[in-house]
Image (cartoon, rainbow, N blue to C red):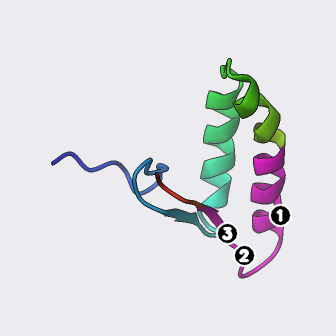
Amino acid sequence: MVRKSTRSIDPYGDTYFNEMQIETFLAEWDRIFDKVKEEEAKRLSPEIKSLAQRCKQEHHLYLRFLGD
């Protein structure tokens, strides 16, 4: 079985990012979502980035992605 890095979003399981991980998440988000072509992803990208920035600024918040 191949395991993904703990810094990645797992498409099959839930993934959480805390305030210490969010800086790396934001850098990756900007890098990959500038290349997105799907309209729904383009529409959601600013909202997700805004939530991530809030997690970075406030304590005890997590950004959570639910897998399939």
Quick one: label 2 or label 1, which is nearer the N terminus? 1
For the residues labelled 3 and 2, say whether their Cβ atoms are less than 8 Å apart. yes
Residue 47, image x, y percentages: 83, 47
| Secondary element type, mark 3 | loop
Q: From the top left corner, tell me how far across and down residue 44 is, in percent.
A: 78, 40
Query: 57 and 10: which one is in front?
Result: 10
- The amino acid type of the residue labelled 1 equals Arg
Count neighbours of disc 2 (C-alpha within 10 A) and say few if under 14, some if 14 to 19, many if 20 or more.
some
Queried whether the magenta region covers residue 63, the answer comes back as yes
Magenta residues span: 47-64
Please tell me how many numbered marks the rendered image carries.
3
48 within the magenta span:
yes
Residue 19 numbered tag: 3
Determine which residue is flagged by label 2.
Answer: 61
User: What residue do we see at 62% from left, 69% from top?
Assistant: 18
Rendering quarter of residue 55: bottom right
